[in-house]
Amino acid sequence: MNWFKRVAQNILTRSKKEIPEGLWNKCPSCNEIIPVKEIEENKYVCPRDGYHFRIGADQYFKLLFDGKHEFLFEEIQPVDVLGFKDKKPYRRRLEEARQKSKASEAVVIARGRIDRIPVVIGCMDFSFIGGSMGTVVGERLKRAMLLCAEEKIPLVVVTKSGGARMQESAFSLMQMAKTAAALSELRKAGVPYIVVLTDPTTGGVTASYAMLGDVHVAEPGALIGFAGPRVIKEAIGKDLPEGFQRSEFLLEHGFVDVIVDRRQLKETLSRLIRILTHKVKKANGNGKETLKAS
Ligand SMILES: [Zn+2]
C-alpha cells in the first residue's frame, strides 16, 4: 500500500511556463479560463483583468520589432567552468534549459527596428534557469552595450531575473561590475539606454544594469526588488507596506519613471527613443511630446 508515496520529484510551478501549449489557459490573477489564442492576440495580457502573463524573449521580440530581427552574440555559449557539483550537473541543467526555453541563454540579444528606428534589444528569459545572471548574460549584454556605443544605436533591455546564477558563483557576481562599466561607455557616447522591468526583476540584475537606465519603464504589477519580502521583513523586524516591491509602489517612490501596459509598450518605446535621440518630428497640441502612462 503506497497510496501516499510521493512518486514525482519534479514540482511544476506556474512561473516556469505560464502559457502552456493547448487551447485554453487559466489566468492566475482572475482564475478565468481563456482561449490561448485570445491571450496571444491581446499581447499576452489577460483580456478580463489586464494581468500580464510572463513571456519569453521570443515573444517580446515579436511584440516590439517591426517584423524581422537579427540575433547577436549567439556564439557566446555557457560552459561549466567550476565543475559545479549538484544533484543535477550544471551541464545537464543548461541542456534542459535550452530545450525548455528555446532560448540559448537567460538573455538573448537582437537588432532590428522599432517604428523604423534601428535598436538593439536584450531580452531576458525567465524559463532559462530563472533568468539568472551567468557569465554569458553579462558578456552578451556588455558586448551589446559596446556595440551600441560604437554605432550609436539605442539599447533597450527587458529584465526578468531571479538574480545571480549560483552554479557560476563569484563569476556571476562579477557581471554586475562588468555591465555597469560597459554602461558608462554607452553614457559617454550619449546613446539612450532604456530598461523595461518585467515580473520578476530581482537580485543582482536589479543591483546592476536594471537600475542604471536613462528611463525605467515597468510593466504593471511586476515584482521588482533586490532581496525577497520575507528576508527584508525578518531583517527589519517590521511588517511591510501593502504592494511593497510592485511596479506601482516603485513608481510612487521614484524608482520607476513610467508604468506601461504591454499593449502600449512598443508605441511608448518608440516615442521615448525619438525624444532621447531628438528625432521627434511632430509635436502634439501643446507643442510638447508627452508620455502617456497606463
Ligand atoms: Zn485575468
Image: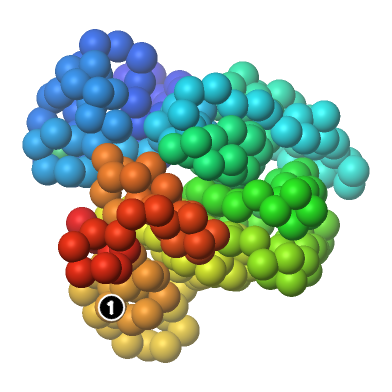
Q: Quadrant of the N terminus?
A: top left
Picture quarter containing residue 63? top left
> Can I make out residue 116 in this image?
yes
Specify the amino acid type for callout 1. Answer: Glu
Label 1: which secondary element: helix
Total label count?
1
Q: Quadrant of the C terminus?
A: bottom left
Q: Residue furthest top?
A: 23
Quick one: label 1, few (<14), some, or many (20+) residues within 10 Å?
Answer: few
Left or right of 112? Residue 152 is right
Left or right of 207? Residue 3 is left
Question: Residue at coordinates 48% horizontally, 23% vertically from top-left?
Answer: 67
Q: Position of residue 293 (x, y in %)?
A: 24, 60
Residue 251 against residue 85 in the figure, above or below: below
Q: Position of residue 92 (x, y in %)?
A: 74, 26
195, 86: nearer the viewer = 195
233, 260: nearer the viewer = 260
Q: How is the image coloured?
A: rainbow
Question: Residue at coordinates 60% horizontally, 52% vertically from top-left?
Answer: 154
Label 1 belongs to which residue?
252
Residue 189 against residue 241 in the figure, above or below: above
Q: Quadrant of ligand 1?
A: top left
Q: Is mark 1 within 8 Å of ligand 1?
A: no
Left or right of 260? Residue 34 is left
Q: Position of residue 66 (x, y in %)?
A: 46, 29
Question: Residue at coordinates 28% horizontally, 24% vertically from top-left?
Answer: 40
Question: Residue at coordinates 10% horizontally, 31% vertically from top-left?
Answer: 32
Residue 116 against residue 173 in the figure, above or below: above
184, 231: nearer the viewer = 184
> Can I make out residue 97 in this image?
no
Q: Position of residue 139 (x, y in %)?
A: 79, 49
